[in-house]
Image: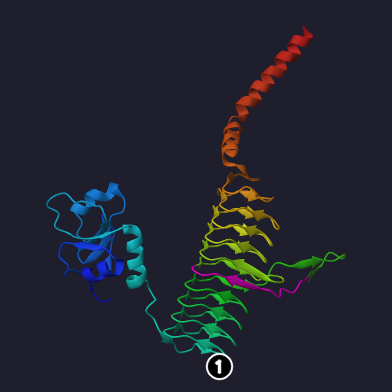
Amino acid sequence: MRDLLVAELADFLGGTLSGPSTKTVFGVSKIDQSIPGSLTFLANSKYEEFIYSTEASAVLVKSDFEAKPGLEKTLIHVEDPYMAFCAVLNRYFNPGVSKSGIEQGAVVSETSTVGENCYIGANTYIDAHCKIGNNVKIFPNCFIGSGVTIGDDCLIYANVSVYNDTQIGESTIIHSGTVVGSDGFGHAPQKDGTYVKIPQIGNVIIGDRVEIGSNCSIDRATMGSTIIHDGVRLDNLIQVAHNVEIGANTVIAALTGVSGSTTLGPNCVVGGQVGFAGHISVAKGTQIGAQSGLGKSVTEENTRLFGSPVQPLKDELKSQVVFRDLPNLKAKVDLLEKLVIKNKEE
């Protein structure tokens, strides 16, 4: 990693520089654990005290930040220091994004096309009739099935399997161990108690700017497509079943399972370990607490749900208060029952 002039960073971020412009940085750090030669940021006012003791060479601050007199520090004033810091990380410090070339042991079918400035890691196999866009990074030990399309600027980390005919948009990230396009769970019961496998002939379509965590399973559709729209964020260890559709900018935390043919609207927020029954729909903007269970559709937008089965968040919290007090309530009921019996006997 080359040293970066703070003036270059300010120009990249469209920020305003105060202090020495000839300083350089070679790394990043937290503002309260900084080292000389690093870039840090101040986004939360409760950390402001550290800007006067930080050893970082440059600090990203808000546009309207005014330092106390005597601060001798190079500052880069930007609208949103946290997002600016993320932009710097992504451009200059993101591991692997600078890799290019096809490593020894990688196999690319003669009928597949690979764009410019791509990286194909060792032991990765790209099957026939694939289209790999520009600046795509596919790390070692990946499998890319036939007819797969991967858009520009995607990152596919090691040990990912992408089955036939999957379509992946631009700037999407898939982390290690994830399987995209495996068969949906389709099995027809027979009179003798056995099952016959239903061929899964659909595919998976993933939009732009999606991120899928490690060890997720995204099943191909029985027919048609399993669809993950633009901007979706999936945590680690998530199961998305066949013919599911997840709306744009929906966020799902770890260990959630979405059963087949369920549709989640855009901008939903789903906590960890949530279970969705199949063939239901969830309205736009729905927020679902961790370990909840949905057995029926949610039709009202922007609702907050919790519990198993789910109910409105406030109702569930009231129910939990009552549940915790059940032993006392039972004791009171038992006492009242005894009093009623005693009164009847008298």
| Residue ranking furthest to the left | 70
- Residue 141 position, x and y percent, is 51, 80
Q: Is residue 60 visible?
A: yes
Nearer the observer, 279 or 273: 279
Q: Please give the range of residues in magenta.
A: 197-209
| Residue ranking furthest to the bottom | 110
Would you place residue 103 above or below residue 333 in this image? below
Nearer the observer, 122 or 232: 232
Secondary structure under the numbered disc 1 in the rendered image = loop
| Quarter of the image where the N terminus is located | bottom left
Q: Is residue 25 visible?
A: no
Q: Residue at x 40, y 84 (%)?
A: 100
What amino acid does circle 1 point to?
A: Glu
In the rendered structure, the answer to whether residue 310 lies left or right of residue 1 reads right
- Residue 234 position, x and y percent, is 53, 62
Q: Residue at x 68, y 74 (%)?
A: 202
| Residue ranking furthest to the top | 346
Nearer the observer, 134 or 257: 134
In the rendered structure, the answer to whether residue 117 lies left or right of residue 317 reads left
Circle 1 packing at 10 Å, graded few (<14), some (14-19), many (20+), is few
- Residue 157 position, x and y percent, is 47, 74
Residue 160 lies within the magenta run: no
- Residue 37 position, x and y percent, is 21, 67
Residue placed under numbered mark 1 in the picture = 110
**Predominant SS along the magenta part:** loop
